[in-house]
Amino acid sequence: MNIQITNYDINEIIGALQVNYFRQKEELAHGQKTVKVNNS
């Protein structure tokens, strides 16, 4: 079984992960309006 992963594939995966990450962060931020988050 020969699997080739190109730079393009890696960039696609990283892009998707980043989108997911930021979306989850946004949802968390909206869900924690009453909770003070110290993020420094």
Image: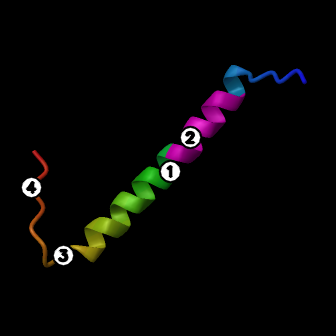
Where does residue 6 sit, x and y in percent of width and height?
73, 21
- Going 56% across and 40% down the picture, which residue do you hit? 15
Secondary structure at badge 3 equals loop
Relative to 38, does residue 11 appear above or below in the rendering?
above
Where does residue 19 sit, x and y in percent of width and height?
50, 50
Q: CA distance from mark 1 to mark 4?
A: 23 Å
Name the residue that disc number 4 marks.
Answer: 38
Callouts 1 and 2 close, C-beta under 8 Å: yes
Secondary structure at badge 1 equals helix
Kind of residue sitting beneath label 2: Gly
From this viewpoint, which residue is outermost toward the front? 1
Task: Characterize the magenta stretch by its predominant secondary structure.
Answer: helix
From this viewpoint, which residue is outermost toward the right? 1
Kind of residue sitting beneath label 3: Lys
Mark found first going from the N terminus, 2 or 4: 2
Callouts 2 and 4 close, C-beta under 8 Å: no
**For mark 3, does the 10 Å Cα neighbourhood hold few (<14), some (14 to 19), or many (20 or more) residues?**
few
- Going 13% across and 50% down the picture, which residue do you hit? 39
Callouts 3 and 2 close, C-beta under 8 Å: no
Kind of residue sitting beneath label 4: Asn
**For mark 1, does the 10 Å Cα neighbourhood hold few (<14), some (14 to 19), or many (20 or more) residues?**
few
Q: CA distance from mark 4 to mark 3?
A: 12 Å
Of marks 1 and 4, the one in the foreground:
4
From this viewpoint, which residue is outermost toward the bottom? 34
Left or right of 9, for residue 36: left
Q: Which mark is residue 15?
A: 2
Does the stretch in magenta take in 28? no
Region of the chain picked out in magenta, as a range: 9-17
Name the residue that disc number 3 marks.
Answer: 33
Of marks 2 and 4, the one in the foreground:
4
**For mark 2, does the 10 Å Cα neighbourhood hold few (<14), some (14 to 19), or many (20 or more) residues?**
few
Name the residue that disc number 1 marks.
Answer: 19
